[in-house]
Image (cartoon, rainbow, N blue to C red):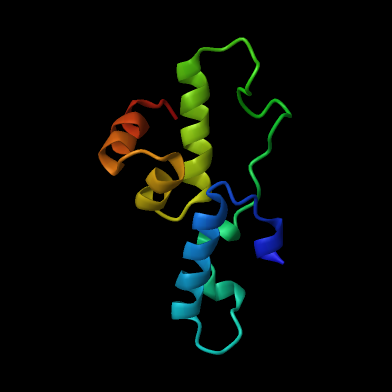
C-alpha cells in the first residue's frame, strides 16, 4: 500500500532502486514495510494548499528551485538519491542545499 500511495518523483528509476533495495533487505520472499526506505513511510508533502511556493506563483525561480529541492530531499533516502532524481551532481546539490534557509 505504501508503494501505491507514494508520489514517485523519481519515476521509474526511483521505483527500480526501491524494489532492488527492498529485495536485498527482505528477510523473506515477502517485502515488508520495514524493508522499504523511510521515504516511503513519510507523510506526503502537500502540494497546492499554501504549504510553499508553487509553479505559477509570483515568486523568483530561485525560490521555486529551493522549494523543489527541499521536497525532493524530504522524499528521498539519501543525498545521492536526491541528486539522481533532480538530475544534478551530488556536489551541486550540497551547494544548493547549504544555501537554502530552513
Asked if residue 73 lies left or right of residue 99, the reply is right
Quarter of the figure with the N terminus: bottom right
Question: Residue furthest toward the bottom?
Answer: 28
Image quadrant where one finds the C terminus: top left
Query: Toward which corner of the image does residue 30 lie, by quadrant?
Result: bottom right
Residue 102 in sight in this render: yes
Residue 98 image position (x, y, % from top left): 32, 31
Where residue 86 appears, as percent x and y from the top left, is: 44, 40
Query: Is residue 73 found left or right of 56 in the rendered image?
Result: left
Residue located 59% across and 79% down the image: 31
Q: Please, which residue is most extreme toward the top here?
A: 58
In this rendering, the answer to whether 2 lies above or below 60 is: below
The image quadrant of residue 51 is top right
Q: Residue furthest left?
A: 91
Give coordinates of residue 85: x percent, y percent. Answer: 46, 45
Q: How many marks?
A: 0
Q: Nearer the viewer, residue 51 or 1?
A: 1
Looking at the image, is 6 positioned above or below residue 97?
Answer: below
Q: Determine if residue 37 is in view.
A: no
Q: Residue at (49%, 56%) from the top-left corner?
A: 13
Residue under the image location 29 percent in, 34 percent down: 92
Q: Nearer the viewer, residue 81 or 78?
A: 81
Give percent across and percent down for residue 59. Answer: 56, 12
Amino acid at each position: 500500500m505504501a508503494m501505491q500511495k507514494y508520489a514517485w518523483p523519481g519515476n521509474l528509476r526511483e521505483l527500480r532502486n526501491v524494489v532492488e533495495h527492498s529485495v536485498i533487505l527482505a528477510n523473506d520472499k515477502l517485502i515488508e514495510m520495514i524493508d522499504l526506505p523511510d521515504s516511503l513511510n513519510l507523510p506526503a508533502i502537500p502540494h497546492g494548499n499554501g504549504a510553499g511556493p508553487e509553479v505559477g506563483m509570483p515568486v523568483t525561480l530561485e525560490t521555486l528551485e529551493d522549494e523543489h529541492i527541499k521536497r525532493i530531499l524530504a522524499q528521498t533516502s539519501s543525498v545521492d538519491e536526491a541528486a539522481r532524481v533532480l538530475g544534478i551532481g551530488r556536489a551541486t546539490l550540497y551547494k544548493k542545499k547549504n544555501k537554502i534557509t530552513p
